[in-house]
Amino acid sequence: MKRYLLFLLACPMLVLAADAPAPSGADFRDEFKGKLDAGWSWVREDPKAWRVTAEGLEVRIQPGNMWGPANNARNVLVRPAPDPAQGDVEVSVTVSNQPTEQYEQADLVWYYDDSHMVKCGQELVDGKLRIVMGREEGDKCRTIKIVPLDFFTVSVRLIVKGNQLRGQFRTPADKEWQEVGECDLPANGAPKISLQCYQGPAKVERWVRISDFRVSQKKP
């Protein structure tokens, strides 16, 4: 708890961060400095609620939800994903936020559409900071695992091998990636990678900072 409080003083925002050596294949990196690289697109864009700064992409966490049938979160950011049938895919990103609302979250998502996805990210659950991994298929949701989290800044990674996906995370105090859970993919068309931030307060501006996004694919 002491290191949690010290980090709160040092870093007033949440960041999902990435790491990783980039193997051969569909390699891509975006640090979100100055602009969004080509290939990104917005779902339900609110142009006044996102910005790119010298430190990364910042998105205001607004009310709305992607968990279940509501599917009304704003500023869902997506880009095409490599085909996992062509080789294992790794995706990672760093996020930073200080949530105060129940289920306020910032997620890295393997995304097909609003009703089919697997998410892993930082979330406030019953007043406690957590890493939450969940799977959604046809708007039917299943929580894979909830793991305690001591930092407002965290790196999240998804590893896709065939039809299986593993979620991992790493805090500034960790040398190695920590396992969260594993599930099969709720495949529904071509896969995308998504960054999603939602269930925030309506009257208070809270901005998630997102940086160091990476994708790599190991060709067989």
Image: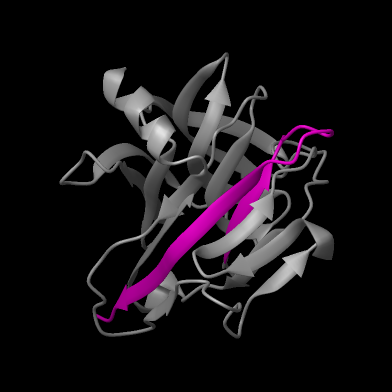
Front-lying residue, 5 or 100:
5
Against 69, is 219 above or below? below
210 vs 85, left or right, is right
Against 27, is 94 above or below? above
Front-lying residue, 12 or 145:
12
82 vs 27, left or right, is right
Residue 7 lies in quadrant = top left
The residue drawn where x is 48% and y is 43% is 120
**Residue 172, horizontal then vertical, whole percent:** 27, 43
The residue drawn where x is 25% and y is 40% is 178
Q: Is residue 195 magenta?
A: yes
Residue 71 lies in quadrant = top right
Position of the C terminus, as image quadrant, is bottom left
Which residue range is magenta in the image? 193-220
**Residue 51, horizontal then vertical, whole percent:** 68, 65
**Residue 3, horizontal then vertical, whole percent:** 28, 26
Q: Is residue 92 magenta?
A: no
Mainly helix, strand or loop, the magenta region? strand
Against 116, is 205 above or below? above
Front-lying residue, 184 or 147:
147
Q: How many numbered badges does the structure rendering display?
A: 0
